[in-house]
Image: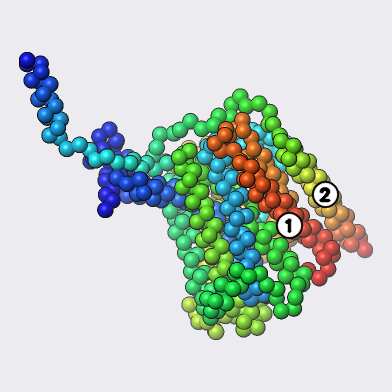
Amino acid sequence: MTAITDTSKTAPGIQDGPGDFLSRTRVVRSPWMQRILTFLMVFGPGLIVMEADNDAGAVSTYTQAGAQFGLKLLWLLLLLLPVTYFCQEMVVRLGIATGEGHAALIYKRFGRWWGHFSLFDLELVNFFTLVTEFAGISLAFAALGVTPWVSVPLAAVGLVALVLTGSYLRWERITIFLCLLDAAWIWLGCKGGFSAAEVGRATLVPSLPLGGLSFDYVFLVIAIVGTTIAPWQLFFQQSCVADKRLRFKDLSASRWDTLLGAVFTVIVAGGMMLAGACMFSRHLPYTDPAQMALALGPRLGPAFRSALLMLMVNASILGTTAVSLSSAWAWAEARGWDRSLQLKFRQAPGFYLTYVAAVFLAAAIVLIPRAPLQGIILGVQVLAGVMLPSALVFLQILLNDKELLGERFVNRPWNNRINWTIIALMFALSAVLAAQALLPGLFPTAA
Amino acid sequence: MTCSTGTLDTFLDLDAVPAAPPGYVVIHPLHDAPEAKRSLDGLGPLRLTPVCRTALVAVRCYLAAIMLLGAWRVVSLLSNLRQ
């Protein structure tokens, strides 16, 4: 049996370090236990960045996919795994090698023009995304009978309190807990009564809906793949890795964290699609996730209805904290301000004020009566379509910068082959999404 | 002789103390000493491979195309408003 020992009692010269039970310095007798404990200490940024992408917009897209096409789009989720993993693995390497955030690196290696372009585009698209997250919170609570005038300000205050504790670990643990709550989507998906064989077949074998290939189907495929990687994710994870001060030796554990996060996220997305498929199998019309909860409540029980609405809130909360932090980290990096969740408010006022401003402004816009939410959603699509290809190309160029990264962290030829393929795919999908948003008449039969 | 006896005593004493178990130290990254990262100071200008240079040109063309699309959208919206 492997023993875990407090270092202060047994290892001469090693002091009992700061931290609680989970983060305290230890000496273990087996290299396996060392790897497991190291992984648990490194674990966090990968899961959070992946699961936070299952935000309000994702809930809407996946449930709509299920409601419109049943299980016919489940196979697509398997494609998301390598795409998300390989993109995020690159920022992990960059963050660990340099200890710098993504915005800081773009400024330092590409110059002020591209730095300003990336930063302002990121801040704008992040802000619009935040508005959609708060719209999700408002919608879900309204379906639960709580007025937006109570739910939205309370959520904003809670989100600010979450980061103002001056402890990275506290923020990370609460956020990991919220991520794990999303596993309840699997339970919701199981309520649809689909057999495991049916789900397995739909996941492994791509198939077309009954009516054949339609523009609706194609555009939903594009929307799902095109929004798999959001620009904020690249900035968020690299800054998070830098804030957590991950070391060179943590690279392997951090890759596992990212891979597990991607797997968990895809499973949760499958749960969302299966929950949406409950509408399809009952021939119910779909408008949005809140309407879906109300429509399925009388058929699948009040627990299903409340769980779906609360999970919608959870998705929005996760999305909001991650997106706001990516804005705050990027802005502070560009301005050269102190930035860390380990710092108190008075030690990093600019960083925290950026976060607070982003959260409260987005919340305020949602509270404006007849706010142009549809236009804001359109703005998110267009700006993400503008920014993502350039962000991915910058990332790939940085990962080929031997002078910056050295032989250990630079891309290998096989990395480059996979990543250029992914970038070409995302380029094409982003272009179609942006063109669809800017020229709706271009694809007349699209949804 | 006294010297060697002292050495022997010391040796025996040390032998009597239970040795610290051999082990692997696990330190949380936030509690570890900061490590020297790859330095960004003094780096020369970014050297681009031919593929990277082509990708950067593609980004510029893409951005120009999106801006043209946006401008087209604004113009068509304005003309619709006039009508």
Q: What secondary structure is found at the residue carrying circle 1?
A: helix
Q: Is residue A428 visible?
A: yes
Q: Would you say A390 lies left or right of A408 here?
A: right
Q: Is residue A144 visible?
A: no
Image quadrant for the C terminus of chain A?
bottom right
| Outermost residue to the right | B83
**Location of residue A398 in the rendering, given as x and y in whole percent from the top left corner:** 64, 38
Which residue carries the number 2 mark?
B65
Q: Residue at x 66, y 69 (%)?
A: A206
**Location of residue B55 in the rendering, given as x and y in whole percent from the top left corner:** 74, 42
**Location of residue A60 in the rendering, given as x and y in whole percent from the top left corner:** 63, 67
* Residue kind at label 1, given as amino acid type: Leu
Q: Is residue A318 above or below residue B62?
A: below
Which residue carries the number 1 mark?
A429
* Residue kind at label 2, given as amino acid type: Ala
Q: What secondary structure is found at the residue carrying circle 2?
A: helix
Cα–Cα span, label 1 and label 2: 15 Å
Q: Is residue A339 above or below residue A75?
A: above
